[in-house]
């Protein structure tokens, strides 16, 4: 069972957030990869293994991301949460406890091209029993530092809106936002939450409820920086324009 003080957790996450923004966090995973909008494709490169960062009780990842319109997804394997002794933390689905994932992506063009902006993002958890938590989730009001945004551009909060899914799937995070061009940094702030499966309530013991051995060394996630087709660009532009109008009214008010 994993128990933690809310006040201590908030302090740790604040420190972790500052470390990520400074780019100097100990235990931070750095990687380079290529990804594109083909949601049906298998990853075209080996998964990125993201180590658990014990001092911040989170995962931290920096990626130089080449956005290739002809590529498929990037796959990441997030190491199972570990305790101070290096053993797995046992997570009980009956006592939900999300773990924060700090990521920043330097958006790069395909070499020899001007590149394309990123206007939406798809993160899909492949490991059953996990779902996303984002800033503003009323279930976990102190999980993220005050003022945290799901999407930031070059360190500043960036407007975004959810992309509808039918049916809704909490293991998928689909969002759209105003274009973020090549050579800018896209940050995504979220958390992974173990909610269990019908046959497995506890994560971290490498066994299901019946005692059968299963793989619990990592949580697999696929992500797609998606480039919309021309018809979708017009719809997105309308939505973005409305978003900026609302944001401007809020600021002027």
Image (cartoon, rainbow, N blue to C red):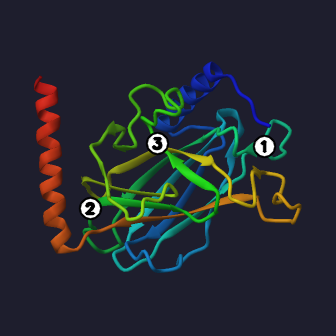
Q: Which numbered disc flags the more N-terminal residue, 3 or 1?
A: 1
The residue located at (70%, 54%) in the rendering is 79
Q: Percent from the top left, x then y, of residue 224?
A: 42, 66
Question: Which labelled disc corresponds to residue 134?
Answer: 3
Q: Which numbered disc flags the more N-terminal residue, 2 or 3?
A: 2
Q: Quadrant of the C terminus?
A: top left
Q: Percent from the top left, x then y, of residue 111?
A: 35, 72
Q: CA distance from mark 2 to mark 1?
A: 39 Å
Q: Residues within 10 Å of mark 2 (few under 14, many from 20)?
A: many
Question: Which labelled disc corresponds to residue 35?
Answer: none
Q: CA distance from mark 2 to mark 3?
A: 23 Å
Residue 208 located left or right of residue 144: right
Position of residue 227 relative to residue 190, above or below, is below
Location of mark 2 (residue): 117
Q: Percent from the top left, x then y, of residue 106?
A: 40, 54
| Disc 2 and disc 3 in contact, CB within 8 angstroms | no
Location of mark 1 (residue): 89
**Residue 117 sits in which quadrant?**
bottom left
The residue located at (61%, 68%) in the rendering is 47
Name the front one of labels 2 and 1.
1
Q: Residues within 10 Å of mark 1 (few under 14, many from 20)?
A: some
| Disc 3 and disc 1 in contact, CB within 8 angstroms | no
- Which secondary structure lies at badge 1? loop
């Amino acid at each position: 069972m994993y128990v933690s003080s809310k006040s201590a957790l908030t302090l740790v996450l604040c420190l972790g957030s500052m470390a990520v923004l400074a780019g100097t966090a100990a235990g931070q995973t750095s990687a380079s990869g290529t990804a594109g909008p083909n949601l049906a494709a298998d990853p075209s490169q080996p998964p990125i293994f993201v180590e658990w960062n014990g001092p911040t009780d989170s995962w931290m990842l920096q990626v130089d991301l080449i956005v290739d319109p002809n590529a498929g997804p990037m796959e990441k394997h997030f190491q199972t949460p570990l305790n101070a002794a290096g053993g797995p933390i046992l997570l009980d689905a009956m006592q939900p406890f999300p773990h924060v994932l700090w990521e920043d992506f330097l958006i790069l063009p395909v070499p020899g091209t001007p590149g394309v902006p990123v206007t939406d993002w798809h993160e899909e958890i492949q490991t059953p029993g996990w779902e996303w938590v984002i800033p503003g989730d009323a279930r976990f009001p102190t999980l993220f530092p005050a003022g945290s945004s799901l999407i930031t551009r070059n360190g500043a909060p960036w407007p975004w809106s959810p992309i509808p899914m039918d049916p809704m799937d909490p293991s998928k995070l689909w969002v759209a936002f105003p274009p973020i061009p090549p050579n800018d940094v896209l940050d995504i702030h979220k958390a992974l939450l173990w909610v269990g499966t019908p046959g497995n309530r506890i994560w971290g013991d490498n066994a299901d409820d019946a005692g059968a051995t299963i793989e619990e060394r990592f949580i697999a996630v696929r992500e797609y920086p998606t480039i919309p087709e021309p018809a979708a660009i017009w719809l997105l532009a309308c939505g973005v324009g409305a978003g900026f109008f609302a944001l401007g009214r809020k600021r002027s008010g």
